[in-house]
Image (cartoon, rainbow, N blue to C red):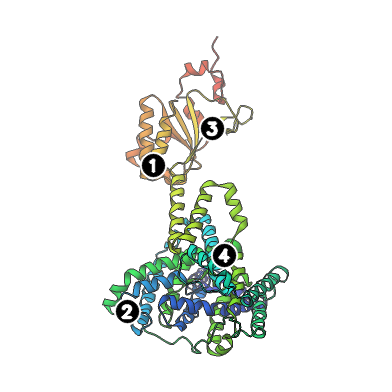
Amino acid sequence: MQSHTHRLKTIFPFLHWLPKLNNQTIQADLIAGITNAIIVLPQGVAYALIAGMPPEYGLYAAIIPAIIAALFGSSYHLISGPTVAMSIVVFSSISIYAEPGSSQFIQMALTMTFLAGVFQLMLGMARLGTLVNFVSHSVVIGFTAGAAIIIATSQLKNVFGVHVPSGESFIHTWIDLIKALPETNYYTLSIAIVTFIVAFGFKKYAPKWPGMLFAMVIGGLMAYFMDAEANGIKLVGEIPASLPPLSLPDFSIQTIKQLAPGALAIAVLGLVEAVSIARAVATRSHQQIDGNQEFIGQGLSNIGGAFFSSYAASGSFTRTGVNYESGAKTPLAAIFAGISLALIVLLIAPLTAYVPIPSMAGILLLVSYGLIDFHHIKAIMVTSRSEMATLVVTFFATLFLELEFAIYAGVMLSLVIYLNRTSKPKMVVLAPDTDDISRRFTNIEKKPLPQCPQVQVERLDGSLFFGAVSYVSKKWQEVEKKHLLIMSNGINFVDVAGVETIVQEAKRRQAIGGGLYFVNMKAEARKLLEKPEYAKLISDEHIFDSKTEAVQGIFIRLDKDICRKCPHRVFHECQSIPAPE
């Protein structure tokens, strides 16, 4: 019965959080969902235009994918929808085959969305979600901070009410913004500032209240009394009042061949975006993210979305940030967001035309500020140079390069640092503590202790695999003592290259009258060494289960003449050797 329930929860992950729903969580999720639906209105329209799609398709892409991803993903706060990066890739991939905005362009976009979803689903079912574990915490923090500043920068033109061309680089946007400041519309600026202050006040002093909604209502009232049209205050504008219509992608072989490479790029980019955003929010909500489940959720959301007029969607930084800051408790908030947006589009589209854009810009500035994790940035800066380098590279790459390349750059740097660490496992020299009754082995760097002149005791902390064998072999060869005892508790994994290195070192030490020994070796590594081709050199006489057995087994092989002259007598067994007359 339990295994059947577990299988059901694996297939339908929403069964994990459905039992947790109560009046409080449903109320919090409903408020967060409605807030999110209002926020995504101008954003969805803008992203659709970037993608070369009609404006309403940006809203369709924010409805169905958000609901499906919430049901089949693992994050409690991630909301899927159209994004800048995905929109740019869709436009660049399809515009060479069809005229942007045309019916052919739309159908090809739907086909590319379907193919990207299939690729994502296949990666998830192949359990490749563990790859996201190589995205270090520093990459996520740096990417989040950089994206927050980009979001804030993109909204400043709406805060000051000035014209800044869209699609420009981070630097050029700031240059154009500074040049346009003399033309600031102070009506627009006042609405943005008041909205920001009200939302900030609610967040700080009444966090349980729907502060963002109240702030936008106040902003809307200000725009009304200031006579928005007469004073140049931009409004969201009227949107088409229709639900996402059913659609059918083009499954012809020729179209699939044309779009497959671009679809794979979108699939990978979408997964990196979604999982990075989910992990970024999870660091604050203390939730565990399942990378495989996120892959499956994103794949299903794009496959389903392709049949409901939705172009390629992924995790949205803005929507996810708003969702978390609005107090969402479960993925039901994303479902409410999709349903609320559908109702807004269908029922009250004329009213949304009066929502002032500067009011929404003020809200997004607050969200951007909340995304920057100052506490962890400070901690990383103080504790680790390598992690600091990863954070800084990812942060500046996010600001000055393409968004997807910034993530790739951070991941690659993380991998390089990880491989550099694992290829140089820590090797600690130990010695018996003669001040301790049990003569416990102690790190000589922490406490200078006398050592046996014939035996060196080391602890190897790390895996002995092909990437580390060169470093380990070199370190072992630098040990001048004939006998080398390795404390193996910290060796988690040994591959064939590692076993070959052990055998070669054992041969070398036997040739000079010494030996290589191991204590507390884990079962998998020991099983490899017990194979006939290795057992001749590394027999049971060289592998011990306890330190006492190891010392006793090695002691009988020592040169007793050296033992007699040794002043240290570090082992208990040394006392059996009479001192020289």
Q: Are marks 1 and 3 in contact (CB under 8 Å)?
A: no
Residue 141: percent from the left, percent from the top?
Answer: 54, 58
Label 4 SS: helix
User: How busy is the neighbourhood of tag 2: few (under 14 within 10 Å), some, or many (20 plus)?
Assistant: some
Q: Are marks 2 and 1 in contact (CB under 8 Å)?
A: no
Disc 4 marks which amino acid? Val
Disc 1 marks which amino acid? Gly
Label 2 SS: loop
Q: Is residue 493 above or below residue 305?
A: above
User: How busy is the neighbourhood of tag 4: few (under 14 within 10 Å), some, or many (20 plus)?
Assistant: many
Residue 377 lies in quadrant? bottom right
Residue 124 lies in quadrant? bottom left
- From this viewpoint, which residue is outermost toward the top? 581
Q: Earlier in the sequence, mark 3 or mark 2?
A: 2
Residue 436: percent from the left, percent from the top?
Answer: 63, 30
Tell me how far mark 4 sits from mark 1, CA to CA.
39 Å
Disc 3 marks which amino acid? Leu
Q: Earlier in the sequence, mark 4 or mark 3?
A: 4
Residue annotated with mark 3: 430
Is residue 76 visible in this depiction of the protein?
Answer: no
Tell me how far mark 4 sits from mark 2, CA to CA.
38 Å
**Marks 4, 2: nearer the viewer:** 2
Disc 2 marks which amino acid? Ala
Tell me how far mark 4 sits from mark 3, CA to CA.
43 Å
Residue annotated with mark 2: 98
Residue 412: percent from the left, percent from the top?
Answer: 43, 54
Q: Are marks 3 and 2 in contact (CB under 8 Å)?
A: no
